[in-house]
Image (tube, helix red, strand yellow):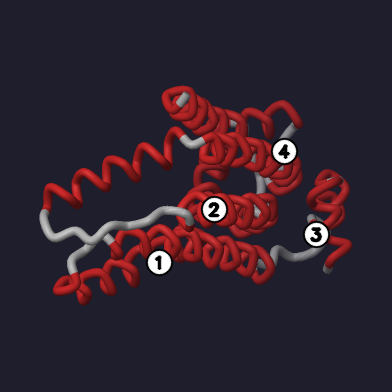
Amino acid sequence: METGFLQVLLNPARFFEARIRDEPSLKVPALIALICGLIGAVSALIMADVTTAMLPAEMGGLGTLMVVFSTAVAFVGGFLAWIIYGFIFHIISMVFKGQGSLNRTLEVTGYGLIPQVFGGIIGSIFSYYLLSGLTVPAMSSAEEIAAFSEYLVTVLTTDPLAQVAGIVSILFLIWSANIWIFGMKYARNLSTRDATLTVGIPVGIYVIYLIITLIGWL
């Protein structure tokens, strides 16, 4: 399995060309999505700890609920990203007369999430270093919470480490897109051009959005 994962990252064309000979299986892709969800939950937990620390002591119950909710949403987000990407790629490939099952599309989309595992780990490390040094003062009014929330947003958007994290996120997404292109080429029997357009259109739009957001931080 390690060899297979390494091949996905470094030589996706060869991996999917061989994989297409077997029946589609969603077990490994679902596991990859699960790992992405877990990493996202860790990042959300780091952020939630700071958020709940802002609340007065008498609102501790609400803080716990916020932690559980934000962590659960982030965890489910790993699976949602997998499904949403897969459906978008499958629908766009229909324009190019793609042939192949939705299960096959979801399979290759799941494998393409492997770079997101590494990107998520790096992002979690960045989040930890950004937030671990913050001192959350005792707050008892809505005005104090609002003021500190504004300060927290400033830290998360202007700190050089946050900007580096944004760039890293974009680079890992592009890496995933490269894998998805070859995956869709074999999963839907597309030309390289059509597979590039199938993946490049939605991912390109999202990357542009991320770049615009990042420029807005600078």
Q: Earlier in the sequence, mark 3 or mark 1?
A: 3
Looking at the image, residue 198 lies above or below residue 4: above
As measured in the structure, the alpha-carbon distance from the residue carrying label 4 to the one carrying label 2 is 30 Å
Per the image, the residue denoted by label 3 is: 5
| Crowd around label 3: few <14 · some 14–19 · many ≥20 (10 Å) | some
Per the image, the residue denoted by label 1 is: 71
Residue depicted at x 51% and y 27%: 211
As measured in the structure, the alpha-carbon distance from the residue carrying label 2 to the one carrying label 3 is 29 Å
Residue depicted at x 19% and y 58%: 139
Amino acid, disc 4: Asn
Judged by depth in the image, the label closer to the viewer, 4 or 1, is 1
Residue depicted at x 28% and y 67%: 66
| Crowd around label 4: few <14 · some 14–19 · many ≥20 (10 Å) | some
Say if mark 3 contacts mark 4, CB within 8 Å: no
Per the image, the residue denoted by label 4 is: 178
Q: Earlier in the sequence, mark 2 or mark 3?
A: 3
Q: Secondary structure at mark 3?
A: helix
**Residue 163 visible to the viewer:** yes
Q: Position of residue 84 (x, y in %)?
A: 48, 50
Amino acid, disc 3: Phe
As measured in the structure, the alpha-carbon distance from the residue carrying label 3 to the one carrying label 1 is 27 Å
Q: Secondary structure at mark 1?
A: helix
